[in-house]
Image (cartoon, rainbow, N blue to C red):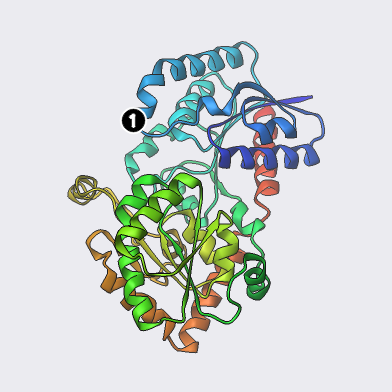
Amino acid sequence: MMRIAIVVGEASGDILGSRLIKALQQQHPNIQFEGVAGAEMVAAGCEPLYPMEKLAVMGFSEVLPRLRELLKMRKDLVTRWQENPPDLFVGIDAPDFNLKLEALLHQHNIPTVHYVSPSVWAWRENRVKKIKGNIDLMLTLFPFEVDFYKRHQIPATFVGHPLADEIPLHSDKQTLRKKLGLNSNAHILAVLPGSRTGEIKRIAPDFLRGLILLHKKYPDWQFVTPLINKDIYKQFETLKQDIAPKIPIVFIDGQSRSVLAAADQILMASGTAVLEGMLINRPMVAAYRVSALTAFIIRRFNMLKTKYFTLANNLCDEMLVPELIQEDLTAENILEEIEKQFLQNKKQRDYEKQRFHDMHLLLRKNASEQAAKAILAVTTQHNL
């Protein structure tokens, strides 16, 4: 009987964890799992020592009031696993909690694996010092991350991205339009202004002003916006009434992936959605804006280490998704980039489609199965 400890801190990690548990069970039936788990992992067979929600906090102001509780929780886990060591520990994402936990367990000769690399390759590279020598293996979702870790002498394995496994290589645009009640013949622009209150506040006004210009020039286009919840809908709808009350927008409750696949083009806030757009293979324009102070600090101290802002461009290593960042995010620039894309020649569009398709194939590796194999290899190596 093998015993594996796992800690996750948010819903995406819970989904990854549940799939990893199932893949490990297929390859090695006699495994017990315990740790910090969500409903998906519990259903897959993980014994919850703490509910995942205890860790699901973000930002300094949210963490500070609960810091003592979080530190006690980590101390309790370390004590438990030092006294009764598992065969292996897996920290899934949640780097602020897991990296320190992994270091403490690793010091006591417990094999440790971190699944989902923190974005040290793009942001605050000095954090890699906290990883080196404190884990047995880093499992990465993207191939270029392995090269970064090799430069820092940290063992790493690329296992692929679960989204690439989930999203089909080809999607039926017309079937999805029918399902969503959208115009089957119109040119559809999916508009995704973000999923957080701060993003809506900083990005949506310019998106709406851009839609005014686009609607004036292309009145037959249909604009479609999927919104994650009622609060975000209310915030965006209020802005729409103030800025663009006469612009027709079809609002969809959730179903963002279906909306992306039903669209001809996408205007979106930069984030994971851009990766989804690349995997669904639609032409996109991505935008983002942080506070003026944050932008100043990032530029002043040269904190961003990547060539491009969006993940899709960094993966392809070329500017295939126009990026409108900070002061470049204007209504006029939105019109220009969307129109340029709309009018691009077939040769260029076919090239971009092929590049996105190639990236999809590269990331489509059955991530859970690959992660399970790599984890079991660590346990075998440790027991030699």
Name the side, left or right, on which 23 lies relative to 185. Answer: right
Place of residue 258 in the rendered image (x, y in percent of width and height, measured from the top left): 60, 62
The picture places residue 347, in percent across and down from the top left corner, at 49, 88
- Identified at 57% across, 21% down, the residue is 109
64, 6: nearer the viewer: 64
Looking at the rendered structure, the secondary structure element under dot 1 is helix
Is residue 170 at least partly visible in the picture? Answer: no
Q: Quadrant of residue 193?
A: bottom left
The quadrant the C terminus occupies is top right
Asked if residue 362 is positioned above or below residue 20 in the image, the reply reads below
Q: Is residue 276 left or right of residue 321?
A: right
Residue assigned mark 1 = 60
Q: Residues within 10 Å of mark 1 (few under 14, many from 20)?
A: few
Tell me, yes or no, if residue 203 can be seen here: yes
In what quadrant of the picture does the N terminus appear?
A: top right
| Residue at image point 52% right, 75% down | 264
Callout 1, which amino acid? Phe
Q: Nearer the viewer, residue 171 or 238?
A: 238
Where residue 289 sits, quadrant-wise, is bottom left
Tell me residue 35's x, y (percent): 62, 24
The residue positioned 78% from the left and 41% from the top of the image is 27
Q: Which residue is depicted at the point 28% across and 69% down? A: 331
Q: Is residue 10 above or below residue 282?
A: above
